[in-house]
Image: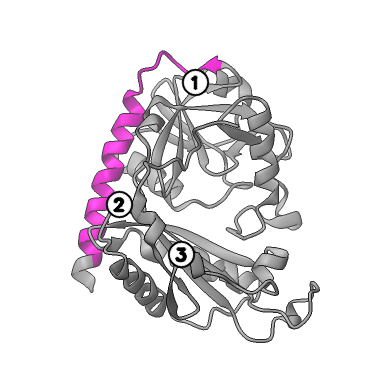
Amino acid sequence: MTDTTTHTAEADDRNDRLLIHVDGKLVPKAEAVVSVYDSGFMLGDGMWEGMRLYDGEWAFFDAHMDRLYDSCKAVRLEIGKTREELRAILDETAAANGMTGDAHCRLMITRGRKAKPFQHPGLSKWGPTIVAIIEHSVPAAALSRGLRLASVPQVRGLPHSQDPKFNSHSKLNCIIACLQAEEAGADEALMLDPHGFVNTTNACNFFIVRKGEVWTSTGDYCMNGVTRANVIRVCREAGIPVFEKNFSLYEAYSADEAFLTGTFGAQTPVAEIDGRAIGDGARPVTERIRALYKDLVARTVAAQKAAR
């Protein structure tokens, strides 16, 4: 098993003493439980969002809520709370844990407890289960060396199978890919789409840099990542050529740079794919994008503060 993943954080003993929001109550980590009849536990029937706290603000909160509410509407999961009420839950939980920054949230909403241990969504009769876990979280320094990816047989499926845009509790497809990557001695899986084009990793969106151009997948078969969209945005604002397009492992292997995007790590460099080193180790475009992204976060957080 690899020691490093895209979500490896520096150790923090405070996370042993967390208070976690579970259905309206703040409870100690050891007591934060849901029913074995919960639809999320039993069937993976739920949606979640990962958000990051900067200077007391949840960066890009509206974009995360857009994705969450769109997903829940698509599967007829009634959240039963407004965006403002969800933000109040996050703010209260962060405050209870003494957090104003360097914190990462996993907000989970399932269809709730079921009357019987069967599939039909109508058996969830008591409304949704809402859980917010917020951890003290700083990406590990080891991530700056770059991750090792392995292309795997498990693919990102077609939208009429299970749309990859759903940030659902049903992650078995990605977990299988992760296991395949570990078996290949890599840190994370590079997944292809149904047509064999490079798509995403099991946990993050994927970008390459070739001759000063930034490429990522078409977006047809990957999570519609908030950080992914923001990287495309900052590239366009800065005049960096960026393309959402089909490309194969051929172009990925010979890229000058490659990196992953996600709320936790922002932009995480990739050192190798299938044992092939990516570029010469220099990452000027990735570093420029990281600086542009940090500036965007600062501007967004300042605007969110001003609007409240």
Would you say 228 lies left or right of 59 here?
Answer: right
Q: Give the range drawn in magenta.
A: 276-304
| Quarter placement of the N terminus | top right
Magenta stretch: helix, strand or loop mostly: helix
- Picture residue at 23% right of the left edge, 52% below the top: 298
x and y, in percent, of residue 78 in the image: 59, 80
* Disc on the earlier residue, 1 or 3: 3
Observer able to see residue 104? no
Would you call the spot at circle 1 few (<14 residues within 10 Å), some (14-19), or many (20 or more)?
Answer: many
Would you call the spot at circle 2 few (<14 residues within 10 Å), some (14-19), or many (20 or more)?
Answer: some
| Relative vertical location of residue 185 with respect to residue 116 in this rendering, above or below | above
- Picture residue at 79% right of the left edge, 72% below the top: 119
Asked if the residue at tag 3 contacts the one at tag 2, i.e. Cβ–Cβ closer than 8 Å, the answer is no
* Disc on the earlier residue, 2 or 1: 2
Would you say 155 lies left or right of 98 here?
Answer: right
Observer able to see residue 299? yes
Q: What residue type is labelled 3?
A: Lys
- Picture residue at 27% right of the left edge, 49% below the top: 296
Q: Residue 255 carries which label?
A: 1
Q: Which amino acid does label 2 sit on?
A: Asp
* Disc on the earlier residue, 2 or 3: 3
Q: Name the residue under label 2.
A: 102
Q: Does the magenta stretch include residue 84?
A: no
Q: Which amino acid does label 1 sit on?
A: Ala
Q: Residue 29 carries which label?
A: 3
Q: Does the magenta stretch include residue 281?
A: yes
